Image (cartoon, grey):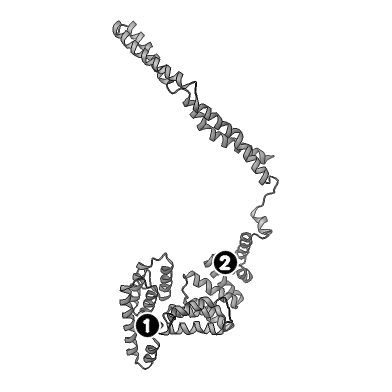
Amino acid sequence: MLFWILVATLTAAVAAVLLLPLLRAAATAEAPQSHDVEVYRDQLEELKRDENNGLISGDDANFARAEVARRLLAATDAVKAVTPAQPVKRGNRLAQLAVVLILPTVGLCLYLRTGNPDLPDAPLAARLANPGDDMNILIARAERQLVANPEDGAGWDVLAPIYYRSGRVEEAAVAFRNALRILGATPVRLGGYSESLIALSGGLVTNEARDSLQKLLAIEPGDPRAQFYLALALKQEGKVPEALAAFEQIVSTSPAGAPWLPLVNEHIAGLKGDTPAAAQQAGTRLGNPTGDDIAAAKDMTAGDRTAMIEGMVGSLAEKLKTDPRNFEGWMRIIRSYSVLGQKDKAADALKQGLAVFPADGSEGKQLLALAGELGLKADGGVE
């Protein structure tokens, strides 16, 4: 009964709010010239008083009285012309009827059809106790238990993949990390943790993700997911021959028709440029050493090898001046400067790369993730 009293009260309040402007509109539309009529009548009375008091002559009073009377008649005629039709008033009455009768009736019918006034309250505590198939309630329940018992490894283990599938990647990484710490390493936990870290870095295979993937391979050799991401890491570092060999290794050990093969073949085609010659040309064009360069470098002294690398990096820097949209080139040159110990140049290259690829974009996030690995600041400084 209390429910229906509240519904009636709220309905009346809403109806009153809707009716107020309609009632005001009807009142103001009744006789717009009625105020003028009152003013002219007052003027006639004032003329009469002035004449009796000798403040105005009889001729002037008659002249002014005639003019005011003419205006009074015109205003009176205007009032009479508006009052009989009352178009605004009739429209207001229909609107008022709709607010008072039609809207509450329609709302009541809809509620009786779709609502359930007899449904008992469902407070959060009761829903957490009986979550049913509601995934949000299940997550809230697990989170509440973990707050009370943060060392519950099974709880973290359950939540981690749910977080990842829900797009809550940062929370997924934390959950996988806690599950690994409490329950130990398994291929599923290590793989999920690695993928969470990679997703957080915008697709960049970080050092922490690489370590996790290598642990996964130690437990389960030949795992295609770990092999793929490690090959991708080689590609991101600019190690084209090694990356190509790693991707081809995945193809050679995978069963025919494996669902990951199209993506692996796509990377292979990109590294090869569809032909081995094109791959070497692409590597030279971007400042990557070819297989012959690597073989020659083995017989060089440390100084000559460093000079060769610096020459390649310099060549890549020149290419980036003419082709600043070469994202892989920026990733490679930043890492190369860091390997050479030229942190200032690496920081400057990072700053230039972020000018081309803003930090809020996918490529910018990868540049920032690489900067975090190498100890560089986004403003061009060094940590």
Compared to residue 199, the image places residue 112 above or below, namely above
Horizontal side of residue 277 vs 83, given as left or right: left
Q: Is residue 380 visible in this depiction of the protein?
A: no
Mark 1 against mark 2, which lies toward the viewer?
Answer: 1
Label annotation for residue 165: 2
N-term mark: 1 or 2: 2
Identify which amino acid the numbered label 2 is placed on.
Arg
At label 2, counting other C-alpha atoms closer than 10 Å, the crowd grade (few under 14, some 14-19, many 20 or more) is: few
Of all residues, the one furthest to the front in this rendering is 275
Identify which amino acid the numbered label 1 is placed on.
Gln
Q: Which residue is mark 1?
A: 281
Compared to residue 268, the image places residue 176 above or below, namely above
Pointer 1 with pointer 2, Cβ within 8 A: no
In the rendered image, residue 99, in percent from the top left (x then y), is placed at 57, 34
In the rendered image, residue 68, in percent from the top left (x then y), is placed at 35, 14
Q: Nearer the viewer, residue 153 or 107?
A: 107
In the rendered image, residue 63, in percent from the top left (x then y), is placed at 31, 10
Horizontal side of residue 191 vs 318, given as left or right: right
Calculate the distance from the C-alpha at mark 1 to the C-alpha at mark 2. Answer: 41 Å
Q: How many marks?
A: 2
Please name the residue shown 64% across and 40% down the image.
108
- Disc 1 is placed on an element classified as helix
Q: Nearer the viewer, residue 156 or 226?
A: 226
